[in-house]
Amino acid sequence: MRYRLLLVVMLIATSLWSQDKHLLYNQTHNPQSLMLNPGAAYEKTNFHIGVPVLSNIYASAGNSVLSVDNLFNANDFNANVAASINRISSRDFVAFNQKLDLINFGFQHKDRYYTAGVYQESDGVLNFPKDLLELAYFGNAGESRSYDLGEINFRANLQTVFHIGVNEQINKNLHLGVRGKLYTSSANIRSVRNTGQFNSRQPVNGLILNQSISNLNLRFDSTGLEDADELSTGNVLIGSNYGLGLDFGLSYYFNERAEFTASILDLGFIHFSKNTRRDVSRGFYEYDGLGIQFPNFSEGDDLITYYQNLGDEIDENMPTETTNGSYTYVQPTKLNLGLSYNFGGDASRCNCRLKSSGKRAGNQTLSLHAFSMVSAGNLFYSINGMYERSFWKTVYAKVSLGIDQFNRPNYGAGIALDVWKFNLFANVDRMNHFGNIYNAEALAYQFGLNLKF
């Protein structure tokens, strides 16, 4: 029964999300691509508006080490848990990102295209605390080692973002764009850059363990957790804490076939000052006793009571300082780079916002996309090669092959339809795991419906 403490963590690890939207990037027929690059060479429309709530729905799932099948297969479950813990390193992590466009619209005025909208987003990162997982599962009876409490490292944020941007064609080859953002949030949690060791020493020919907590400096910042049950839809959408941010992007045509694109997203922050809490534990604590053993569930012992009693004893000797001070949350900044080459049969006139020829050469595109982001000290990255083909300027198909921080080849595909005034798109990543989804360490889905006039 020892695995019960770990079961929730393991299940979360196989179902959380991380963000990368390479299949949507630089789809210039899709107004949603402006959200990934405000300077994209977006095809000319007088006006576009996203169908509320349906204009862009995004969710991706991934972690760097585990799959559901690692835990739930034909082998003994306890052996699976032990093997999974052994497979984990302190550098492994799980992450999540979810985005829902509430409203998105844009319009053209002379050589500029203005956009505005509101979206809701949640994201977070949790590092696997390998030492603590080993301590929780195997215990420390008979062990002489130190467990690193500094492996506690996580952050999560729920926010609503109001944005307004402008895309301008500078000359026949260059587009530039910028977007301003107002962040608002009522829920946030983080604990990073912690230190501390739990030391366990077994004397020779002795049953009593020498145990201590040393060099401890743990800090937990949170907003809205104490009154989370009182959160309503209103104060989730319009939070009590605010911040500002900027997006920048560009598109440059070397010629009618070759294009370079780049964007930097979410250069910004949120200052949390309302409904905040900071818990700080510092110091040194030494005690002797038997190793931590799990309670006897068959005799009715309670796990929560067991650890509560242990926690109360430590709190008495190493109290936690609790304050309501403010703190600043820095947004994880994203970098996109792209290089594309158009070829094949002549494409229909697309009314692209190029003053030169008014069309791209070819109805096929080969492209390379790179993405990076640092969050809670973890590097997120992906490199994808993609092939896209358009049919009658109505159907757009796209496939991708790449690698990312989850250390496996990744196959993806997307399709988009431009029919009358409707722009419909769907992208699916990690298609190489569709044969057995339980082997997947990452999945990604995206869907959207917009109107173009």
Image (tube, grey):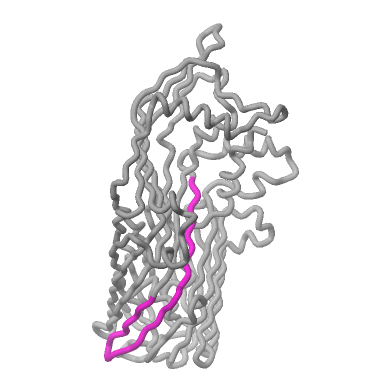
- The magenta stretch is 93-117
From the image, which quarter does the N terminus lie in? top right
Whether residue 106 appears in magenta in the rendering, the answer is yes
Q: Nearer the viewer, residue 371 or 61?
A: 61
Whether residue 72 appears in magenta in the rendering, the answer is no
Q: Is residue 56 above or below residue 360?
A: above
Instruction: Give the image quarter of residue 142.
Output: top right
Instruction: Give the image quarter of residue 257.
Output: bottom left
Q: How many marks?
A: 0
Residue 111, percent across and down?
Answer: 27, 88
Task: Look at 65% across and 58% down and name the residue there.
Answer: 437
Q: Is residue 291 above or below residue 364?
A: above
Residue 283, percent across and down?
Answer: 34, 27
Residue 425, percent across and down?
Answer: 53, 78
Task: Look at 52% across and 64% down and name the residue there.
Answer: 59
In the picture provided, is 31 more to the left or to the right than 407? left
Task: Look at 36% across and 76% down and name the residue there.
Answer: 259
Q: Nearer the viewer, residue 256 or 105?
A: 105
| Prevailing secondary structure class for the magenta stretch in the rendered image | strand
Q: Nearer the viewer, residue 416 or 105?
A: 105
In the picture provided, is 296 more to the left or to the right than 198? right
